[in-house]
């Protein structure tokens, strides 16, 4: 506050403290260097707070529509009205009162500033005192407010408070919701999420980021993602999680650009660090490249200083032990020292790791969302001759190994060489010709050096030619078709694509960059240059991203051709047709291809196409396709988690079978592959299974009508917001909330706000009305300020009751919200040296065992609970304007005709105290709490056991201590009065 503003301060002026935590107050006393501010809770409750000058700011004037309280001395009581406008000349507010409030139906009064009072931000804590002073509101407001609060609590109970995912613009998936809850509901916030491709781990990571920022709006997040996924992440954050990439709280970087994050890490000290596809970062430590090692060490330091860390990976825990060790070093530097990295293979299997959440593996194999495989094949005698010549080379090698012990010892090298020739033959004749030339001693072209693995080329050059091999290779060289002869395959593919609707997007996977270029060039000629885009290894990251955007957004671009680079991190979930221009003899590569296009939210089947060469029915490519389709059902069911099995079992088995018996070996190997896969799966630890509550949460989320019925009455009737289609609207004539609060909703009022999630997914810029979404959260915060609907009194005419005066039944209704008390937990967090803000995580965990709920109690004037079924039936019927009569304003005297004025305040206090005691005898205490505490105890025992087995007794003890605090909070829950009122039942009207 400036000196000039301080000098202008006067007693009775409205002010706010800088953080606006307490809200609006009124200057009561000005002291040297500070001001005593009176905060108004209700006509019966005020609080004085001394605040330094520098922490204050003048309010200026109250916003129109602000609810206020005025004491009218002539009438001897308080009245609630709304500010309409301010007269600067007189310093008076024009206050409008509800019809029938003031004598003579007076609606507008000019009230001096010092006589106008506005509630502070804290929730009303003394509703019973308000009722005792007969300051109750219409019972209709009680119904709408209670409905809104019950709706919030039901949403929280059903989804366990996972608002980061609930409010996202994504399709809710039960197991994904459960996994996110597990990641954000405990004290341990350094986790690794291992999930198969297509499971949705990136969405889960985005939900964790959003949850972190919802819990701590001032928090900072560092996101480290694969270079090719930066654009995908930017779009996902904006489109699905309502987070702009330029949000100062976020730093999104490509994993190979660590230098761009140094200032953010050093100055902002992010509280959450996320590594998407963390195996890429971990791989840096396995190289001898100094720049990569420095990059890894920087990320390890950033993770070490962060309060929370999340790693995602598609690798199963049994697959690449060294990579897992390097990943977990980012999570736990002391538990996974880099000095032990060489021993990772032996040490990893001995470690229990509670921080690893491995999901999606309990239902192997998963069905693919694909139709029947379509095979495109072109006949040709030249290619059949080529296939026969390759077979002659195989037989020559096999025979040589049988007679040459030295060569037999290098069998694996021979297998690799044959595999190289076979894969080139099935993909790129150009590369096959160059590889054969390399074997024959010709100079190796630069492209071949870049294209093929060094192992293949080394074998070609160094392995001595066998007797008779040169003749076979020369024949193979002569038979290898040129580009013109390869065109029939491409013509067949182009002809097929032309049969598809123009809107269907087609991705074409190729084994080599040379194949990718050939396919791109030829399809561009046949389909048109604008119809084809490509992704290949020579492109920059920006060029790859541009190709993906072109394929996704441009209607004229129907085909995207990819080399192996596209198998890794391109987002192709919008494709409808996937074409395998070749079929590598590597299940890992094939599975990675499918993972690029498979998505949980796919609404139509994915058409899979294989383009085969013309080597005849018994060519290697044809037989391998048959094994994949008929024996392994690869094109119908996913083999996710296959990496370790393929690397350690399947690949060696296929190579051996290829060299041993050619296509017949592949057929024979099919059964062995199937058996080996079953054995591998049986040997793996079971992945985390879901608790099952996600299905109920999904059913709740789909009940958009039920959520609308809960929330809309308060939003429409109490706040005065209109509804036009999927949008809320506000006009100065109808709105019933202060303009400063309304301004906080302006962005949301510009976008569609449907209750139906499926509708929100279809409408651009739309957001479903859910907790965690800014609109509903603003209305929820406003509810704490708005005191309406917390007190009521009404007369209920009932035909089943006596009409005689004096036979009326009069009693009270108290409605409470109950949930686990987190005060003790917050104290324990402080005692354990953990950040106090973790209490929100632990509240989500508590919600998983004891969901928050509301309890409504009816009592007679003596404080006894109503048990009579007929009377309960009468009392529990909703308030009806057509039947029930509010006892407010001028009708308060009719209330005191039944409960005398001298008895009224005593009856309010007595029944309120009785209701609190009755709560302890309610079924909520007697039945739900013991069951919840027992379930929590069992869950804690399992978690503590896992920590002990991991050698972290300190974390096991921490888990137990926090669990005891949670249990204590459940046994003595936080109780909040939602509404207090009086009901009179009679056979007559008042």
Image (tube, rainbow, N blue to C red):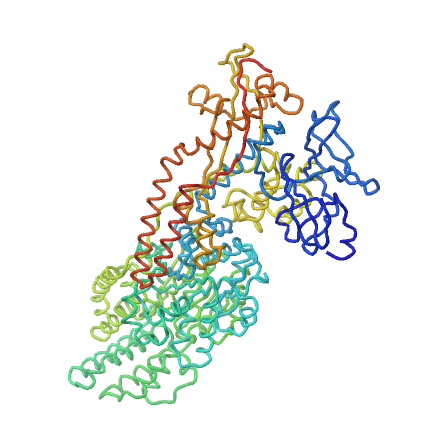
Viewer-proximal residue, 476 or 787?
787
Image position of 903 (left or right of 92) = left
Viewer-proximal residue, 632 or 182?
182
Q: Position of residue 747 (x, y in %)?
A: 63, 50
Q: Position of residue 867 (x, y in %)?
A: 42, 23
- Which residue is rendered at x = 54% and y = 67% of the image? 546
Tell me the quadrant of the picture where the N terminus can be found. bottom right
Q: Position of residue 20 (x, y in %)?
A: 64, 50
Q: In this rendering, does residue 489 appear at all?
A: no
Tell me the quadrant of the picture where the C terminus can be found. top right
Q: Is residue 53 above or below residue 756?
A: below
- Residue at the outermost front position: 32
Viewer-proximal residue, 715 or 507?
715
In the rendered picture of this protein, how many numbered marks are placed on residues?
A: 0
- Which residue is rendered at x = 33% and y = 83% of the image? 436
Give residue 422's quadrant in the image.
bottom left
Image position of 828 (left or right of 420) = right
Q: Is residue 924 above or below residue 528?
A: above
Image position of 338 (left or right of 860) = left
Q: In this rendering, does residue 497 appear at all?
A: yes
Q: Is residue 686 above or below residue 346?
A: above
Viewer-proximal residue, 451 or 693?
693
Give residue 659's quadrant in the image.
bottom left
- Residue at the outermost right position: 89
- Residue at the outermost top position: 804
Q: Position of residue 377 (x, y in %)?
A: 35, 65
């Amino acid at each position: 506050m400036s000196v000039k503003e301080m000098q202008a301060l006067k007693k009775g002026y409205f002010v706010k403290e800088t953080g606006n935590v307490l809200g609006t107050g009124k200057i009561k006393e000005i002291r040297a260097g500070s001001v005593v501010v009176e905060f108004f809770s209700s006509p019966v409750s005020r609080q004085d707070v001394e605040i330094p000058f520098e922490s204050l700011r003048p309010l200026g004037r109250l916003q129109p529509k602000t609810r206020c309280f005025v004491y009218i001395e002539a009438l001897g009581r308080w009245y609630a009205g709304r500010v309409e406008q301010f007269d600067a000349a007189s310093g008076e507010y024009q206050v409008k009162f509800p019809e029938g409030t003031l004598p003579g139906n007076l609606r507008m009064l000019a009230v001096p500033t010092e006589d106008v009072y506005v509630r502070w931000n804290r929730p009303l804590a003394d509703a019973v005192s308000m009722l005792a002073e007969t300051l109750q509101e219409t019972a209709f407001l009680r119904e709408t407010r209670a409905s809104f609060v019950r709706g919030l609590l039901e949403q929280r109970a059903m989804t366990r408070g996972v608002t980061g995912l609930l409010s996202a613009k994504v399709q809710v998936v039960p197991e994904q919701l459960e996994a996110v809850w597990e990641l954000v509901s405990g004290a341990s916030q350094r986790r690794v999420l291992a999930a198969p491709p297509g499971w949705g781990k990136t969405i889960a990571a985005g939900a964790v980021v959003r949850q972190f920022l919802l819990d701590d709006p001032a928090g900072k997040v560092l996101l480290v993602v694969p270079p090719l996924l930066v654009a995908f992440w930017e779009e996902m954050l904006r489109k699905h999680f309502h987070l702009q990439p330029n949000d100062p709280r976020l730093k999104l970087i490509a994993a190979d650009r660590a230098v761009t994050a140094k200032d953010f890490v050093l100055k902002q000290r992010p509280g959450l660090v996320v590594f998407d596809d963390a195996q890429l970062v971990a791989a840096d430590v396995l190289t001898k490249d100094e720049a990569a090692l420095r990059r890894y060490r920087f990320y390890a330091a950033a993770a070490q200083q962060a309060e929370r860390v999340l790693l995602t990976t598609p690798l199963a825990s049994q697959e690449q032990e060294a990579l897992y060790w390097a990943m977990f070093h980012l999570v736990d530097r002391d538990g996974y020292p880099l000095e032990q990295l060489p021993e990772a293979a032996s040490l990893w299997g001995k470690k229990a790791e509670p921080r690893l959440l491995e999901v999606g593996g309990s239902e192997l194999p998963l069905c693919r969302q694909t139709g029947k495989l379509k095979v495109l094949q072109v006949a040709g005698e030249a290619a059949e001759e080529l296939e026969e010549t390759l077979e002659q080379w195989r037989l020559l090698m096999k025979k040589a190994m049988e007679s040459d012990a030295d060569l037999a010892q290098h069998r694996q090298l021979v297998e690799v060489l044959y595999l190289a020739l076979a894969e080139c033959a099935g993909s790129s004749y150009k590369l096959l010709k160059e590889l054969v030339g390399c074997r024959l001693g010709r100079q190796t072209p630069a492209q071949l050096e870049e294209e093929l693995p060094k192992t293949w080329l080394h074998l070609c050059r160094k392995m001595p030619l066998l007797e008779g091999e040169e003749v076979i290779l020369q024949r193979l060289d002569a038979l290898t078709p040129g580009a013109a002869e390869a065109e029939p395959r491409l013509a067949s593919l182009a002809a097929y694509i032309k049969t598809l609707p123009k809107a269907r997007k087609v991705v074409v996977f190729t084994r080599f960059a040379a194949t990718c270029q050939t396919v791109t060039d030829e399809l561009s000629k046949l389909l048109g240059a604008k119809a084809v885009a490509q992704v290949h290894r020579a492109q920059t990251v920006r060029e790859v991203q541009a190709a993906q955007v072109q394929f996704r957004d441009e209607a004229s671009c129907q085909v995207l051709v990819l080399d192996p680079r596209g198998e890794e991190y391109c987002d192709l979930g919008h494709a409808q047709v996937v074409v395998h221009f070749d079929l590598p003899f590597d299940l890992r590569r094939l599975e990675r291809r499918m993972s690029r296009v498979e998505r949980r939210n796919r609404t139509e089947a994915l058409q899979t196409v294989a383009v085969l060469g013309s080597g005849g029915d018994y060519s290697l490519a044809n037989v391998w396709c048959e094994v994949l389709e008929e024996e392994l059902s690869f094109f119908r069911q996913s083999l996710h988690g296959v990496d370790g099995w393929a690397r350690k079992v399947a690949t060696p088995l296929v190579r051996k079978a290829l060299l041993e018996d050619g296509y017949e070996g592949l057929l024979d190997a099919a059964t062995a592959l199937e058996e080996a896969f079953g054995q591998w799966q049986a040997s793996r630890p079971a992945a985390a299974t879901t608790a099952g509550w996600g299905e109920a949460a999904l059913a709740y989320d789909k009940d958009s009508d039920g959520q609308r019925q809960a929330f809309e009455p308060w939003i429409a009737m109490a706040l005065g917001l209109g509804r036009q289609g999927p949008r809320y609207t506000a006009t100065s004539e109808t709105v019933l909330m202060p303009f400063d609060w309304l301004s906080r909703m302006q962005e949301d009022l510009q976008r569609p706000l449907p209750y139906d999630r499926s509708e929100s997914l279809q409408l651009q810029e739309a957001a479903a009305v859910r907790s965690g979404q800014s609109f509903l959260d603003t209305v929820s915060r406003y509810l704490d300020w708005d005191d309406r609907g917390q007190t009521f009194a009404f007369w209920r005419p009932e035909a089943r009751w006596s009409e005689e005066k004096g036979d009326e039944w009069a009693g009270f209704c108290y409605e409470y919200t109950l949930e686990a008390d987190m005060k003790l937990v917050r104290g324990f967090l402080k005692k354990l040296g953990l950040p106090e803000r973790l209490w929100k995580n632990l509240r989500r965990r508590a919600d998983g065992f004891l969901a928050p709920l509301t309890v409504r109690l009816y009592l007679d004037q003596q404080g006894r609970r109503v048990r009579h079924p007929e009377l309960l039936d009468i009392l529990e019927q909703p308030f009806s304007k057509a039947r029930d009569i509010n006892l407010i304003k001028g009708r308060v005297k009719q209330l005191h005709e039944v409960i005398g004025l001298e008895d009224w305040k005593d009856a309010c206090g007595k029944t309120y105290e009785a209701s609190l005691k009755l709560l302890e005898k309610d079924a909520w205490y007697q039945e739900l709490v013991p069951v919840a505490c027992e379930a929590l105890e069992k869950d804690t025992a399992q978690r503590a056991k896992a920590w002990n087995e991991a050698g972290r007794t300190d974390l096991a003890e921490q888990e137990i201590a926090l669990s005891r605090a949670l249990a204590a909070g459940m046994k003595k829950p936080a109780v909040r009065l939602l509404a207090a009122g009086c009901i009179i039942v009679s056979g007559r009207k008042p």
